[in-house]
Image: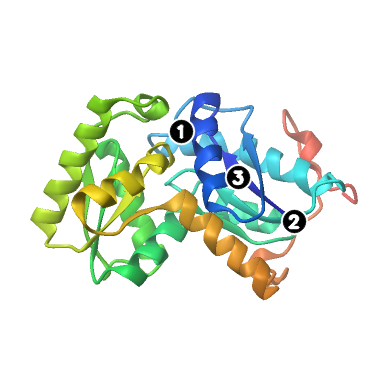
Amino acid sequence: MTLVIINPNTSTPMSERIGASARRAAHGDVHMLTSRHGPASLEGHMDEALAVPGLLERIHECEQDDSLAVSGYLIACFGDPGLAAARELASVPVLGMAEAGMHMASLVSARYSIVTTLARTLPIAERLLGEYGQREHCAGLHACELPVAALEEESDAIYRTLLEACRQALDSDASDGLLLGCAGMTDLATRLGDTLGVPVIDGVTAGVTLLESLERLGLTPAKHHDRALPLAKPIAGAFAHLTRSDA
């Protein structure tokens, strides 16, 4: 069985880093995909809205590919764009990396802090905390003011900026754990944890681990009510190929 990790932005270098981190965490196969449509990075509500059709297209392709035995999908963006729609479309579990990371962080820390990229994305993280029932577990939200694109390559300066933001978050929140709020930070979690002496959770590896656990338990989503297949109807425009065959 194969886990499919989807980067909903169009940055191939970002996908390469995400895929490498996911494969280190996974026990099985990982199939890394990048969206063909939308922004190069997701840093706001409009970016996320534009990214959703490309994300759904990738899931649709995997669902139609009989040679690919998919056991779960992970949306590799901390805003979890299109998560509800992806769950309608998919026949197997779909997790968002923020959702997975928040739940994992709450298991290993009494109160965790989130450190993400730009301050403009903090309202998105705040909304997700409420949706996932995590507000009481999160001690604070912090931005290191690094754009997502800056995380595409390794850099000591980038690491030092993120490390300082993490230290300040721990001090100001009196928290005992950290959650990194961007898929581009995925390969820095272990290094940060070793330096800071607290658990540092990355939503990509947390999502991979949770999806593999669901697979081992034989748990698949109920395809009714909120997660029933999309209604069959014509779709006009660039994504007409996503129309169900029985429409």
Determine whether 63 is above or below 184 in the image: below
Amino acid at the residue labelled 1: Asp
> Whole-Å distance between the Cαs marked 2 and 1?
32 Å
> Within 10 Å of the Cα at label 2, are there few (<14), some (14-19), or many (20+) other Cα atoms?
few
Residue lying at 34% horizontally and 51% vertically, measured from the top left: 125
- The image shows residue 25 at horizontal and vertical percentages of 52, 52
Most distant residue in the right direction: 246
Report which quarter residue 184 is drawn in: top left
* Left or right: 138, with 55 as reference point: left
Residue labelled with disc 3: 5
Q: Quadrant of the N terminus?
A: bottom right
* Amino acid type at image mark 2: Met
Callout 1: SS? helix
Residue lying at the far front of the rendered structure: 194
Q: Residue 22 carries which label?
A: none
- With respect to residue 175, does 97 lie above or below? above
Residue 1 circle label: 2
Foreground mark, 2 or 1, reads 2
Q: In this view, does 202 lie to the left or right of 48?
A: left
Nearest to viewer (mark 1 / mark 3): 3
Q: Position of residue 226 (x, y in %)?
A: 63, 67
Q: Which label's residue is closer to the chain start, 1 or 3? A: 3
Circles 2, 1 touching at the beta carbon (< 8 Å): no
Determine which residue is flagged by label 1.
Answer: 47
Could you give the CA–CA distance between mark 1 and mark 3, rounded to whole angstroms? 19 Å
Label pair 2/3, CB-CB below 8 angstroms: no
**Marks 1 and 3: CB-CB under 8 Å?**
no
Residue at point 54% right, 63% down?
210
Q: Which of 146 and 45 is in front in this view?
A: 146
